[in-house]
Amino acid sequence: MSAHYKNLLRGAKRLPFEKGLMPPIKAISLLAIGCALAGLLGCSNSSHLAYVTLPTTNQVTGLHVDNDSGQLSSVFGSPFPAGTSPTSVVVHPSNKFVYVTNQGEADISLFTIDRSAGSLTEVTPRTPAGTNPASLAMDSAGAFLFAANQGSNDISVYSIDSGSGALTEVSGSPFATNAGPVALTLSPSGNFLYVANPNLAVVSGFSVSSGVLQPIPGSPFAVGHVPFALAIDPAGHFLCAANSQDNTVSVLAIDSSTGALTAIPQSPFAAGTNPISALFDPSGKYLYVANLGSGSISGYSIDSSTGVLTELENSPFTAGSGTLFLVMDSSGKLLFAGNQGAENIMEFKLDSSTGDLTNTSVSVATGSPPTSMSTTN
């Protein structure tokens, strides 16, 4: 486990962290390397892109994702230098820009994407954020960027220039929140923002209007101990919180008018050891949770009316050492797992009829512990 994530979980002393990290998995084939080089000659028509943050080396890795095979291969010139301890990455929906939080220097990097080669070029100067910016979220239109500042206990909000990608802090930003925000997510409508506050065992909620945040009545909302990740289903009916210390997942119903959260009667639900990341598939039928301590992925079906989770028959699915984050590919057919212990990205195929995950045997070594990933459309 990297020093960055030990700091994020300070106060949750009972969480087990991986010791003696596994060596990186070497899984890039000669064909994949050839495709990476071919990207300079227009291979982008048959692949899309993904970017991964590597805090211990102050870099961002770029990957080609083959549209047919799912094969992963390095972007030519990758990895790319970033600021100090880059921890969270978001790709703009236009596929023109990448944003990265540099936790060690309290700012945000803007990169432009070479759409044929996939290479990144940083646009300086960097944009100031609060203390220890831990994670990013962006609305679906790409109009606003939100940064959770763990050290200063606030949320920075920026409007995004659609032409240049430049960030401009909105009036009133940063907005105060409860202590130690580490994760945040927007409702599909973009009207509500939710923030995980691990050491308080709560989720803070805000209404959003032109980027301006106002606390939702009744906020904060209680969940389990050390909520470290949040996910909202595509219909915007339910919010799920992965509670790392309780080994559970809380499910809360979202009031579509006010944004207030109410725990469903059966919540919380059992997960693996130290659940630390959560996401829904594009259909909203399945929820997946990464279990850091057990190196696995728990899969659930969710009742669209009640929010009740039912673990899939073949769950949990074996991932890698220190599974830290999950990312759904833009195709909706692949799921990527970032493993801190194994220092790699693993790929799974999603069965849309059962929700089962199948290891595709495709993986790529990152060379140091990855902390986040984002893909182009």
Image (cartoon, rainbow, N blue to C red):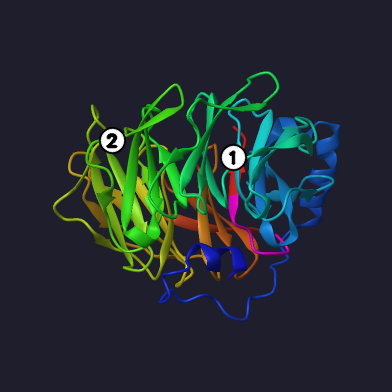
Which residue is denoted by mark 1 in the rendering? Answer: 90
Q: Residue at x 72, y 49 (%)?
A: 60
Q: Is residue 192 above or below residue 334?
A: above
Callout 1: helix, strand or loop? strand
Q: Residue at x 69, y 28 (%)?
A: 96
**Residue at the bottom extreme?**
20
The kind of residue on which mark 2 rests is Ile
Which span of residues is magenta-colored? 365-372
Q: Residue at x 23, y 59 (%)?
A: 268
Q: Is residue 151 above or below residue 213?
A: below
Asked whether residue 1 appears in the rendered view, the answer is yes
Q: Is residue 168 above or below residue 313?
A: above
x, y percent for residue 370: 63, 59
Specify which label sits upstream in the sequence, 2 or 1.
1
Instruction: Name which quarter of the figure residue 366 lies in.
Output: bottom right
Asked whether residue 285 appears in the rendered view, the answer is no
* Residues packed near mark 2 inside 10 Å, few (<14), some (14 to 19) or many (20 plus): many
Q: Is residue 180 left or right of residue 30?
A: left
Magenta region's main secondary structure? loop
Q: Residue at x 47, y 67 (%)?
A: 292
The kind of residue on which mark 1 rests is Val
**Residue at the left extreme?**
265
On whether residue 217 falls in the magenta region, the answer is no
Q: How many marks?
A: 2
Which circle, 2 or 1, is nearer the viewer? Answer: 2
Instruction: Name which quarter of the figure residue 161 lies in.
Output: top right
Q: Between residues 366 and 311, which one lies in front from this camera angle?
A: 366
Q: Is residue 343 left or right of residue 242?
A: right
Q: Which mark is residue 216?
A: 2
x, y percent for residue 242: 36, 57
